[in-house]
Amino acid sequence: MFKKTLALMVFLLACVPALAQTPVAGKVYVNGIDADFPPFAYVGPDGQPTGFDVDAVNWIAKEFGFKVEHHPMEWSGIVTSLKDGKIDMIASGLSVTEERAAQINFSLNYWTIKQVVLAKADFQPSAEDALKAGLKIGVQAGTSDAKAMADTNGKDGRKYELSEYPSPALAAQDVANGRIDAAVMNDAPAAEAVSKLGLKIVGSAGIPDEAFAVGVNKQDENTLKLINAGLTKLMADPYWQELIEKYKPGEVH
């Protein structure tokens, strides 16, 4: 698998000069993002989209000579917006799933995330016990983790009451306020909640780790090739490590 991935990256790097000369130069691409999914994508205090994924796409756009606009959108409908041609891509912590792959195309994977249980600092049960105790658990609507939690509820002794939220940050806020007992989310927004709200990551949510990739319309092969070439070039550039150091995805900071 590694050899195949390496060969693909070498091929895409070879395509970079050619892509830079194609009609993408000057074109405006619209990237749909979650407005509240730090550190990957969110709207900053100045009202402007920012985050790991936003900066990554901005770098690719600069390297290849196109323009990009980042549009905050309701996450539960973002894949439909991509399918309907309202946006050109989703670079916003989008998990690769079989269900989504049947509807849209995915770029190269660029990050792997874990699904964790987030609770108050004085929460005593283990993550495994918490998910068998009939507690109120928050999840972000329209996410792969929300679906996985719904699918596994009632299996292998798991029992909980799910509450859906527009964003993981809002779910974390309700944990802090005591409206729900815990929340399940990716490790990156969980780490943000630990830092800002004094919560703690209890442990694994017991659902599979997932990869992040950029989503593109099934009929848009040119944009898929462009993003793959851009990601390949970015991940080989020192700026990639600068992004990781800047945003520290998944680390408590």
Image (spheres, rainbow, N blue to C red):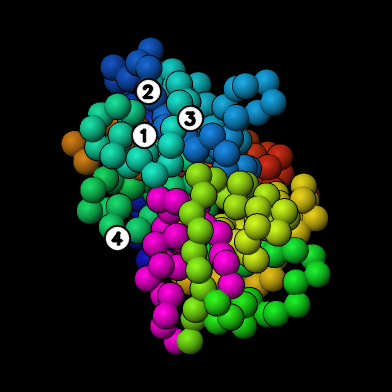
Judged by depth in the image, the label closer to the viewer, 3 or 1, is 3
- For the N terminus, the image quarter is bottom left
Q: Are marks 2 and 1 in contact (CB under 8 Å)?
A: yes
Task: State the SS at label 1.
Answer: strand
Sequence order check: which comes first, mark 2 or mark 1?
A: 2
Residue positioned most to the front? 179
Eye-nearest disc, 3 or 2? 3
The three-letter code of the residue at mark 2 reads: Tyr
Please, what secondary structure does the residue beneath circle 2 have?
strand
CA gap, disc 3 and disc 1: 12 Å
Residue 89 marker: 1
Q: Which residue is mark 3?
A: 72
Give the residue at mark 2. 29
> Callout 1: few (<14), some (14-19), or many (20+) C-alpha neighbours within 10 Å?
many
Residue in view at x 65 percent, y 53 percent: 174
* Mark 3–mark 2 CB contact (< 8 Å): no
Task: Return the residue found at the far bottom.
Answer: 156
**Mark 3 / mark 4, whichever is N-terminal:** 3
Q: Is residue 243 left or right of residue 227?
A: right
Q: CA distance from mark 1 to mark 4?
A: 18 Å
Give, as a single range, the part of the protein colored magenta: 135-156
Whether tag 2 and tag 4 are in contact, CB under 8 A, the answer is no
Question: Reading the chain from its start, which is encountered first: label 3 or label 1?
Answer: 3
Location of residue 26 (image quadrant): top left
Mark 3 and mark 1 in contact? Answer it, CB < 8 Å.
Answer: no
Q: Which residue matches tag 4?
A: 98
Q: Please state which amino acid type lies under the numbered disc 4.
A: Glu
